[in-house]
Image: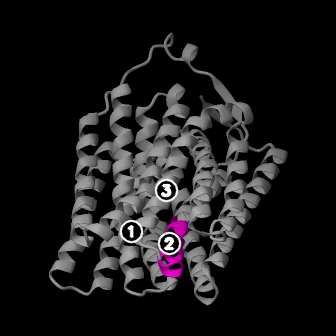
Amino acid sequence: MIRTHRLLLPAAFITSLGNNIQLIGAALLLVQAQGSMLDVGWLFIAVAVPQAVLSPYFGRLADRLDRRLLWIGCDVVSAVAALGLPIGLAVGAPQQAVVYASNFALAVVAALFMPVSAALVRERVPAPELRRFNGHYEIAVQSGMLLSASVGGFALQYFGSTPLFVFNGITFVSSAVLVVAVGALRRRIETPAEAPPVTKRVAVRLPVGALALLYGQGLVVVTVFNALLPVLIVGEWHRGAAVVGVVDALGGAGFLLAAVAYRRSAVRLGDLRVALIGFVACNALLVLQPLFGVGALMGLVLVGAFVFGQARIATRLLLMTSVDESQVGRAFGVANGYGLATTVVVMLVTSAITDRTSTHYGFAALAASSLAAAGLAVVWIRRAKSDRTYISTVTM
C-alpha cells in the first residue's frame, strides 16, 4: 500500500497542477488582453457548467467501472485537450474561442476525474490509513491548484503561452504513467480473524448532504478566488503575472503547513469542528486580503490557505467515510456538482459586483456566500442530530 500512496499522491498533484495551469494561464491571457472581470468570470463559468451538470452522473459511473482505468483515460484525454490550445493559437484561431473551447473540454474530463479519484482512494487505501492519506491527498490537490498560478504566472511572463501549454500537456501524460504503475486491483479475501481487531469503528451522526454542502463550498472558494486574484493583482494593482505566482506559491505553502497541523487539530477538536472553524476563519481573511497591498495579501493568503486547508481535509474525510465504498463516487459527484453549480451563481454575482465597484467587494461577496453555506450546514447537522434519524459508521 505504501507504493500505491507514493504513486497516487504525485499523480493527483500533477493532474491538479495541469488542470489549473490551463485555467490560470487562460485567465491571465484574457486579463492581459484588457478583459474585464466578467470576461474572466465567463471563462470560469464555462469550466464550471459542464462539471455541475455531469458530475452526479459521472459519480455513478465511477462506482460501476474500473476506477484506475478511468483515471488513466481522464489524463490522456486531458493531455489532448491541453495541447489543443497552443496548436489553435499557432494556426491563428481566435484567441478567445480557443481558450474557451480548450478549457471547456478539460472541464468535461474533470467532472469525471473528481469522483473517480475519490473512489479510487477509498478502494485502494486501507481504512485505518484514510485520515493520514486524505490529509496528504487533499494537500497534493490543493497545492497543485494554487501552485498552478505560480508556474503559469512565471512561465507566461518569461517564456510565453505556447511553452506553458505544451508543458501542461506533458503533466497529464506523467500522471497517467504514475497511475498505470499502480497496477490492477488484487482482491483479497479477509478471514474472520483478520478484520475486526485492526479496525476501530466510531458512530458519527452526520448527514451526508450537509457534508456535501461543505465540501462543495470549498470548490466555490478556490475557483472564485483564482478568478479574483489576477484581476486584483494584474488588473487593479498593475503588477506582473509573476506576482500572481508568488502569492499563490505562498498559498501552496499554507496548504503544506495545514497538512502538518491537521492531524493534531483533528485529534483535539474533531473533524467537524476543524471544518467549520476553518471555513469561518477563511471567510474573515478573504474580506481582508485585498485591502492592504501586495505585502499584506501575501501574508493573509498564507494564513488563509492554512486554515482552509485543514477545513478541506476534514470535510473530505467526513464525506468519504460517511458512505459505503461502493457509493463514494456518487457522493463526491453530487458534492462536486453542487459546488460547481453554486460557483456559476457566485461567479456571476462576484463578477458583476467587481466590475461595478472593485475587487474589495468581490472578495467580500465570496466570503458572504461561503459563510452562508457554512451556516446552512450547521443548521442541517443540528436538525438531523435532534431528529436522530440517521447514523453513519466511520472507520478510522
Q: Tell me what residue is drawn at x 65 percent, y 31 percent.
A: 264
Q: Relative to 44, does residue 9 appear above or below in the rendering?
A: above
Q: As rendered, which of 31 and 324 lies closer to the eye?
A: 31
User: Quick check: 219 left or right of 6?
Assistant: right
Q: Tell me what residue is drawn at x 44 percent, y 45 percent.
A: 140
**Residue 23 badge:** 1
| Disc 3 to disc 1, C-alpha distance | 21 Å
Q: Tell me what residue is drawn at x 60 percent, y 48 percent.
A: 306
Give residue 303's position: percent from left, percent from top.
62, 52
| Disc 1 to disc 2, C-alpha distance | 9 Å
Q: Relative to 80, does residue 235 appear above or below in the rendering?
A: below
Q: Residues within 10 Å of mark 1 (few under 14, many from 20)?
A: many
Magenta: main secondary structure equals helix
Looking at the rendered structure, the kind of residue marked 3 is: Gly
Q: Residues within 10 Å of mark 3 (few under 14, many from 20)?
A: many
Looking at the rendered structure, the kind of residue marked 1 is: Leu
The quarter of the displayed image where residue 182 is located: top left
Which residue is tagged 3? 333
Give residue 129's position: percent from left, percent from top.
51, 28
237 magenta-colored: yes
User: For numbered disc 2, what is the local secondary structure?
Assistant: helix
User: Quick check: 156 left or right of 336?
Assistant: left
Looking at the rendered structure, the kind of residue marked 2 is: Ala
Which residue is tagged 2? 227
Magenta-colored span? 223-238
